[in-house]
Amino acid sequence: MRKALGDGEFGNHQEEQFSNALSVNIVKKKDSPTHICIDFWQFNKLTVFDPYPTTPAADIFHGMKKDKYLSKIDLRRVTGRYLSVKKIS
């Protein structure tokens, strides 16, 4: 890569080796602009399985169809009201 770009073209550049680094390739095709291709194979090996996946929002709202009241805890404004209850009309 240094031969293609030149040694001093990007200043003081050092190549480093990281155990969790992703492989990034820049591909220029004949009929389209430049594409960046990232190899996630090594990164996917580090992914931790979540045994409790999040419920889809559509299922949550479908279950609230018959409810009359909605309560929520606003954690952004801890100094104000801790719990707000609104009537759903």
Image (cartoon, rainbow, N blue to C red):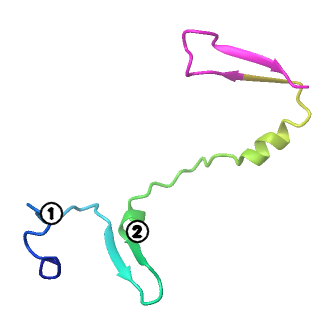
Drawn side of residue 53 relative to residue 45, left or right: right
Image quadrant in which the N terminus is located:
bottom left
47 sits to left or right of 86: left
User: Which of the two residues, 62 or 51, is positioned nearer the viewer here?
Assistant: 62
Q: Which residue is mark 2?
A: 40
Observer-nearest of 77 and 5: 5
Amino acid at circle 2: Phe
Q: Position of residue 33 (x, y in %)?
A: 44, 79
Chain part drawn in magenta: 72-89
> Which SS class for mark 2?
loop
Q: Going 12% across and 82% down the picture, which residue do you hit?
A: 3
Disc 1, SS: loop
Magenta span main SS = loop
Q: Position of residue 26 (x, y in %)?
A: 34, 76
Q: Label 1: few (<14), some or many (≥20) within 10 Å?
A: few
The quarter of the displayed image where residue 34 is located: bottom left
Instruction: Indicate the amino acid at tag 1.
Output: Glu
| Position of residue 48 measured from the top left corner of the image (x, y, whole percent) | 45, 54
Labels 2 and 1 touching (C-beta < 8 A) = no
Q: Which residue is mark 1?
A: 16
Viewer-closest of 67 and 31: 31
Q: Is residue 31 above or below residue 17?
A: below
Quadrant of the image occupied by residue 63: top right
- Among the 4 quarters of the image, the one containing residue 18: bottom left
84 is within the stretch colored magenta: yes
Task: Please determine whether, in this image, residue 84 is positioned above or below residue 52.
Answer: above
At 50% across and 55% down in the image, what residue appears?
A: 49
The residue shown at (92%, 33%) is: 66
Q: Earlier in the sequence, mark 2 or mark 1?
A: 1
The quadrant of the rendering that contains the C terminus is: top right
